[in-house]
Amino acid sequence: MVSSWNHTGFENLMGMLHVKKWRLFAVVAIVFCIAFGLFQYARPSKDHGDQPIQVTLTAADLLATFATSDSTHTLVIGQVIAVQGTVQSVGAMSLVLHPGISCALAGPLTNPSLYKGAEVLVKGRLVGYDALFGEVQLDFASLIES
């Protein structure tokens, strides 16, 4: 006696299970990608305050280095430098040294008006040169001396 068992029902069931496995895999992959993206977004930035100073320059020398395009030989974007100069303008989270060094501070100044016109030494990470405004930019900056 030959069995006349119908394989189409079994094959349909296995096909549905296969589709469900792929859907489950896709959902898990999407959740993983979202979680990883949120983790990267919320990760705190690197603290540059504890890194050693690699170069110390005056504000005029630093600006002249970038203006003459000699910066590729002496300075590296991203390195921590110290700049000495006179404060031209100051805000709660930024200051500009004469003749054109823009410093984005890592923390707010307690009394910004005290620093206007003062000779200071600023430590910060070198971001680059803004040719439009003609200024060198530092970020994560902090005052060493005033």
Image (cartoon, rainbow, N blue to C red):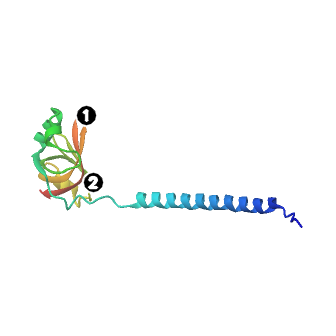
Q: Considering depth in this image, is 51 or 122 the residue closer to the camera?
A: 51
For the N terminus, the image quarter is: bottom right
Mark 2: give few (<14), some (14-19) or many (20+) Cα within 10 Å.
Answer: some
Q: Please, which residue is most extreme toward the right here?
A: 1
Q: Which of the two discs, 2 and 1, labels the residue nearer the N terminus?
A: 2
Q: Considering depth in this image, is 124 or 41 the residue closer to the camera?
A: 41
Quarter occupied by residue 13: bottom right
Mark 1: give few (<14), some (14-19) or many (20+) Cα within 10 Å.
Answer: few
Residues at marks 2 and 1, CA–CA distance in whole angstroms? 22 Å
Q: Residue 71's spot in the image, x, y percent?
A: 16, 38
In the rendered image, the vertical position of residue 136 relative to residue 25, given as above or below: above
Q: Amino acid at mark 1?
A: Ala
Tell me if residue 118 can be seen. Answer: no
Q: How many marks?
A: 2
Q: On the picture, is 41 further left or further right than 120?
A: right
**Mark toward the viewer: 2 or 1:** 1
Disc on res. 52 = none
Q: Amino acid at mark 2?
A: Met
Residue at coordinates 17% horizontally, 54% vertically from top-left?
123
Tell me if residue 140 can be seen. Answer: yes
Residue under circle 2? 93
Q: Considering depth in this image, is 49 or 89 the residue closer to the camera?
A: 49
In the structure shown, which secondary structural element does the residue marked by tag 2 occupy? loop
Residue at coordinates 27% horizontally, 33% vertically from top-left?
132
Q: Please, which residue is most extreme toward the front here?
A: 1
Q: Residue 112's spot in the image, x, y percent?
A: 22, 55
In the rendered image, the vertical position of residue 98 relative to residue 51, given as above or below: above
In the structure shown, which secondary structural element does the residue marked by tag 1 occupy? loop
Q: On the picture, is 45 further left or further right than 50?
A: right
Q: On the picture, is 28 further left or further right than 92?
A: right
